[in-house]
Image (spheres, rainbow, N blue to C red):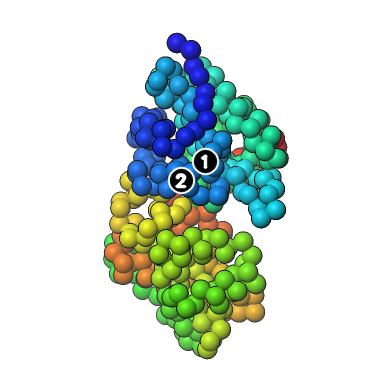
Amino acid sequence: MNITIKDYTPVKHAGPMLELWGKALGATYPVSERVFLQRADGGHPTVEPGDGLVAFAGRKVIGFVLAEVVRTAIGRQENAYLAALMVDPDRQHAGLGARLLGALEQRLRERGCTKITTGAGPLRFWTGVPDDLPIAKAFFHRQGYQSAPSLAPDMVIPLNRPYVMDPKYRARMEAAGVRVTSATLKDAGPLLDFENREFLGWSPTMLTLMANGDINNILLAWHDQEIVGSITSFTPGSRWRAANLVWERIHGTQMGGYGAVGIAKAWQGQGLGAALSQAAAIHIQNQGATCCYIDWVGPEEFYAKLGARTWRRFDQMSKSI
């Protein structure tokens, strides 16, 4: 039977694509419907019509590829991220994956993209190619993708017993005169000013949380009336199923997580980042979370001191296109 490749249309193809995901990777990386549809429904700037391709044998979906494209205010589209590439197990090892990937790369090239990276996009499923999928890594090597200099880890803090702040970090926070609160709508302006000043590029994440009604899951560190730090947290009830909540069918629907922890440059070196991270873990535990997932961490040693263990490491493979 001839194989045809069509543009991805969310309303037509999302359901069959999710079914195919279950068949191909449901045993190792099962994904829930709400997580999949938030990323693949085409209703956000990094996934638009033409950013995905679907392969058919007759009317049956047998493969798909989906990208994220970072589109800036001036319209340049240099960076692209491979969100997912899936082929029906009964059709693998016949060149379909390479065909889909090649067609996507050509389309991205025509749109002005010059580089594509596996995973790592703003609405990612994976941080990169998982280290427990060596066949996938070998496939991308054959397609000309280069491994990153080091693997990016995701870590997990178990919350099956009360999690409390280390007294030394609490003491440092008190000595600095810093307090932590959940953000409210009246804090939106000062928060965005802080992010644009200290962590340029983090504002879109904050805006996404606000737009989804999750602003209270942004924790702020204050000194008097000044914001000196922020962290995003995600709870079992979060409306936006961010990267920290993708693997809820592995870790349970009561999972939570945190990320994007930042302390103003003038306030760094006092242990406030650790204190704010622990405050976030306590916040999500109070919201019913049984584990805290930390996506795409920096130094593992920092989070290990806070009780985290490494769950997976990922290779953010890339290719110039």
Name the residue: 51% across, 64% down: 206
Amino acid of disc 2: Arg
Rendering coords of residue 247 (x, y %):
38, 48
How packed mark 1 is, by other alpha carbons closer than 10 Å (few <14, some 14-19, many 20 or more), is many
Circle 1 is placed at which residue position? Answer: 83
Q: Are marks 2 and 1 in contact (CB under 8 Å)?
A: yes
C-alpha gap between disc 2 and disc 1: 9 Å
Amino acid of disc 1: Ala
Q: Which mark is residue 178?
A: none
Q: Is residue 59 above or below residue 177?
A: above
Rendering coords of residue 249 (x, y %):
33, 46
Quick one: 304 or 136, which is closer to the camera? 136
Quick one: 96 or 41, which is closer to the camera? 41
- Tell me the mark number nearer the camera, choosing from 2 and 1: 2
Asked whether residue 37 appears in the rendered view, the answer is yes
Name the residue: 61% across, 27% down: 102
Rendering coords of residue 96 (x, y %):
52, 21
Q: What quarter of the picture does the N terminus occupy? A: top left
Mark with earlier residue (2, 1): 2
* Disc 1, SS: strand
Name the residue: 50% across, 19% down: 4
Asked whether residue 119 appears in the rendered view, the answer is no
Q: Is residue 311 above or below residue 55?
A: below
Q: What quarter of the picture does the C terminus occupy? A: top right
How packed mark 2 is, by other alpha carbons closer than 10 Å (few <14, some 14-19, many 20 or more), is many
* Disc 2, SS: helix
Rendering coords of residue 128 (x, y %):
54, 43
Name the residue: 45% across, 42% down: 40
Quick one: 271 or 143, which is closer to the camera? 143
Q: Which mark is residue 39?
A: 2
